[in-house]
Image: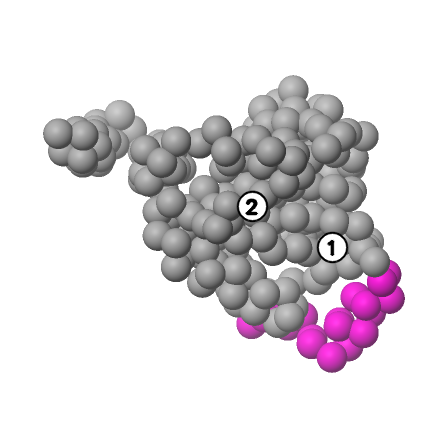
């Protein structure tokens, strides 16, 4: 299987000229809505591509001011992705900016072209959005501070060693398709619950988490009986 042909897969593309404006926010929300129609067996693929028209971002930024209220809408759309019942995949085919990093951080599985760079900078600025919060949890403070404080760029190879990138592939379409094709329905149908348990365990003690984990286990056992 060299491409995604399953009917339950929703693909949305953003490019390196993307800013977190109304256009991008509406596009992400629309993709979430489409993915939600497939229930728990859906798949959302977020592609990060090279900009085809680099000047587009300049036009968008003038016609859609990036005020705080718009950034808030963008953050809510990102959070919506994070809470989806479906499998989420980031397919990265261009050097990553702050917007691309925010999108990649949401994914359950990440595949990247080789020799790409990952940064939080959009132009010369680093917006201290919730990507900073997620990044520290994903790769740890030591590496996150290189990106957050100094605007440094980390390679796909480095992030692969840290476990942030799951696959480095010269053929990301084929790799993504193979990964999706290997997913059993039983795994997909409950992925949102397990994702939530993982995220919550970063902030909860064992005793605080026990009840939620037992309830989730009971749900799986009942579904199997």
Q: Is residue 50 above or below residue 171?
A: below
Taking the image as shown, residue 66 lies to the left or right of residue 205, namely right
Taking the image as shown, residue 42 lies to the left or right of residue 223, namely right
Q: Residue 103 appears at what percent x and percent y?
A: 60, 49
Q: Is residue 222 above or below residue 5?
A: above
Mark 1 falls on what kind of element?
strand
Q: Is residue 99 visible?
A: yes
Taking the image as shown, residue 28 lies to the left or right of residue 83, namely right
Q: Tell me which corner region of the image, top left, top right, bottom left or bottom right, holds residue 132.
A: top right
164 falls in the magenta region: no
Which image quadrant: the N terminus? top right
Residue span colored magenta? 53-70
Mark 2 falls on what kind of element?
loop
Q: Which mark is residue 5?
A: 2
Q: Is residue 147 visible?
A: no
Taking the image as shown, residue 29 lies to the left or right of residue 128, namely left
Q: Which mark is residue 15?
A: 1
Give the label, 2 or 1, closer to the camera.
2
């Amino acid at each position: 299987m060299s491409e995604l042909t399953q009917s339950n897969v929703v693909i949305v593309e953003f490019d390196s000229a993307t800013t977190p404006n109304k256009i991008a926010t509406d596009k992400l929300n629309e993709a979430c809505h489409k993915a939600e129609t497939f229930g728990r067996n859906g798949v959302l693929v977020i592609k990060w591509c090279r900009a085809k028209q680099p000047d587009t971002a300049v036009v968008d930024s003038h016609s859609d001011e990036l005020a705080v209220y718009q950034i808030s809408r963008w953050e809510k759309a990102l959070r919506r992705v994070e809470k989806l019942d479906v499998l989420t995949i980031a397919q990265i085919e261009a050097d990553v900016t702050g917007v691309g990093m925010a999108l990649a951080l949401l994914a359950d599985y990440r595949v990247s072209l080789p020799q790409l760079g990952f940064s939080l900078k959009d132009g010369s600025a680093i917006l201290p959005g919730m990507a900073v919060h997620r990044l520290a949890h994903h790769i740890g403070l030591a590496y996150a501070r290189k990106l957050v404080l100094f605007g440094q760029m980390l390679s796909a190879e480095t992030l692969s060693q840290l476990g942030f990138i799951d696959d480095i592939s010269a053929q990301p379409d084929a790799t993504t398709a193979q990964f999706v094709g290997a997913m059993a329905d039983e795994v997909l149908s409950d992925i949102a619950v397990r994702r939530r348990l993982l995220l919550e365990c970063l902030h909860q003690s064992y005793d605080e988490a026990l009840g939620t984990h037992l309830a989730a286990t009971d749900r799986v056992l009942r579904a199997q009986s």
